[in-house]
Amino acid sequence: MKVIKINKKDWENGINQSKKEYQLFGPVKEKDNYIFKKLQLDEYPDMEHKDTLVSPKSILFPQTEKILQTNLDESIDDHHIMKQVKKDYSKRAVISIKPYDAKAIQILNLNFDTDEYKDPYWCEAYKATTFIGLAVNNPSVFDFSSSTNTGPFAEQGLDVLLIDCSKEYLAKVLTDKGQAFLDVAGFNQETDNKKAIEIINNMKKKAENAISSQISTQNLKDKNTLDLYEAPFWDDIAFSCINCGTCSFVCPTCWCFDIQDETKGNLSYRIRNWDTCMSPLFTLHASGHNPRGEKTMRVRQRFMHKLKYFLDKYDNGIMCVGCGRCVKLCPVNIDIRKVCNLMNSHEPDTDN
Amino acid sequence: MNKLTQNIRELSSNLLKNNKVDMVIGFKKGTIPMAVSPMAAHNIEQTKEFIWDSNCGINLANFISDKKEKIGIIAKGCDSRNIVTHITENKISRDKLHIIGVPCTGMIDKIKLQSNFNDDITDYSENGEDIIVKSGLIEKNLKKSDYLKSNCKTCMHRNPVIYDELAAELVQEQKIEDQFADVKKIESLSIEDKWNYFDNLLKDCIRCYACKNACPLCYCPSCFVNESNPQWVGKGQDKTDIKTFHFLRAYHCAGRCTDCGACVQACPMNINVRDFTRKLIKDSYEIYGWEAGLDITKRPLLDTFSLKDDDSFIK
């Protein structure tokens, strides 16, 4: 594996170079919050950034996305025929994405790109995107990513992993896509690979050791689904829930969406919006029946999906990357780490 | 353990022991610094989990709507005013409640406090009006009064307005020079600047509805934003739809909002949604001399009228 050295003095110049071929997305600070957004010509990714409130999944899967359109004017030949909205899927790169958020993109990919179904909007955007990760040297207190199959220096889903070594970045080139980006940016200073890898591995160890929070997931797979479903702790967990969508909307792995048609004049769009299983409307049937009418059912669904159904379906770990956003932002402190550990250690009451 | 926590545990446990209530609703310690979680204690053992500190800013009146059981509830000033509102709006009857009042000296603005530190806050504790905050790098002793939530700074009802017993002695109410300085600042903007101000205010809204769901006033079985037949408002990120949600939510709170600030505390995007409700509080006060949730014998502002009401808006 090749490692490139990037002097921080050359960084902005490289970013400028890459903007000639790529649309760049990166974290910036706006109104005291960090957000991922498309970088304008005079904007640079904030390489010191803390977690963005909302995850960068929105770059590939926007909260609101027009997917189909039609014209209702009956004098036009193809009126009322829904057609795919034309979009710009030119090359783009996400800069300074954290390894756990890149892992989350891989989890979303499992849902949007399957043998059976391929979501064209996701697949096109995914294909066009290069992921330039930034290793996390100082994990936040909310970070529990080392127990969710990723970690502060994890490489899955990344094309390049940047490591901040104070005066310079070491760039681990992970894919051809990553190499192509570095070439365009003009980052090509080779370095003693063996020595660089050693430095990176030491920093990795240090960062992993700095993570103080862990979850246990090893028993989840063998747990009986109905035992977990009927576990006595759900009412207690759900008591404080106010049924807002904060957890789902800030989550990098929540993928559920709702489809809406919106019309203005003769122009009509089919739009998909992020949805959340915390909302009663999520499962409301046309008949008026709601299979998840009570909040406990909705809270249970969210955790069962992430920590059991997903695991059973894909056999690819849990649907949580340990970013800690929901832990930090839940207004009533419902903590997925606690719920996960409860589920992982749950033994059904055999007396009944 | 602080004295208040101790008293709350003792009073709650007595209520359950004497079968005066089926449950007591209060706060338990959270899993991260400065977080607390609403909980219901059904037995004496569970009351040992109750805590009280300046992070208990979520409004517990939100957790009693339509409850049929007999409930004990821990209520600071604003919670008690929302309990009054619940009673006058027939969401719960007074005889179903046993209110343990907590005189309050204000709640902490977590975001403001965190902005003092370069790394994450790892520990928080209180000693009276002092707070001791640690991060990985540094420890600071700070004055709580410098880090109050903005609604607490202008609060005129720190003491519960209704209670069956108190967990501490009543505190001195604040004297505020200009209670509505923030509203006046927005009022003084030109129409265009006002528009831009609200545009910018709502720019980051992700429509998670934490503001309305944390609000004790938002108890409709189905909120208009969740209606699908008919659908009153678009569900996406269209600016007009986002504004429609916030404007309508605010108007539904007119004459009812107690400025508890739970909406702002719950918002994950740090949007000061109180900018809307504050204007309505000011209007209610200036036009009708009304403050919400002070008296269970008074009908809510907007379902009553007086011949003395200002009618200058009818032209």
Image (tube, rainbow, N blue to C red):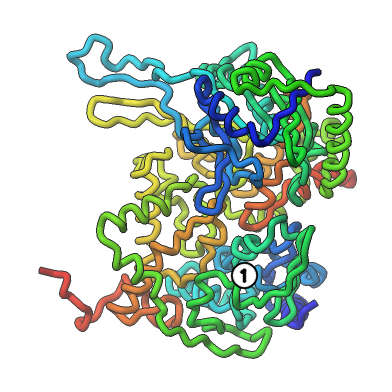
Callout 1: few (<14), some (14-19), or many (20+) C-alpha neighbours within 10 Å? many
Give the left or right position of residue B179, taking residue A37 as reference. Answer: left
Give the left or right position of residue A75, taking residue A51 as reference. Answer: left
Q: Quadrant of the N terminus of chain A?
A: top right
Q: Give the residue displayed 68% in from the left and 43% down from the top.
A: A300
Q: Nearer the viewer, residue B160 or A7?
A: A7
Give the left or right position of residue B303, taking residue B165 as reference. Answer: left
Q: Is residue B139 above or below residue B223?
A: below
Percent position of residue A74, x then y: 20, 16
Percent position of residue B182, x then y: 40, 70
Q: Quadrant of residue A131?
A: top right
Q: Give the residue displayed 56% in from the left and 18% down from the top.
A: A128
Q: Quadrant of residue A110?
A: top right
Seen as rendered, the residue at the extreme front is: A9
> Is residue A302 at least partly visible in the picture?
yes
Q: Give the residue displayed 53% in from the left and 44% down from the top.
A: A279
Q: Give the residue displayed 51% in from the left and 86% down from the top.
A: B174
Q: Nearer the viewer, residue B58 or B192?
A: B192
Percent position of residue B97, x then y: 59, 76
Seen as rendered, the residue at the extreme left is: B315
> Tag 1's secondary structure?
loop
Percent position of residue B73, x then y: 63, 73
Q: Is residue B35 above or below residue A54?
A: below
Q: Quadrant of the C terminus of chain A?
A: top right
Q: Is residue A1 above or below residue B281?
A: above
Read off the residue under disc 1: B108
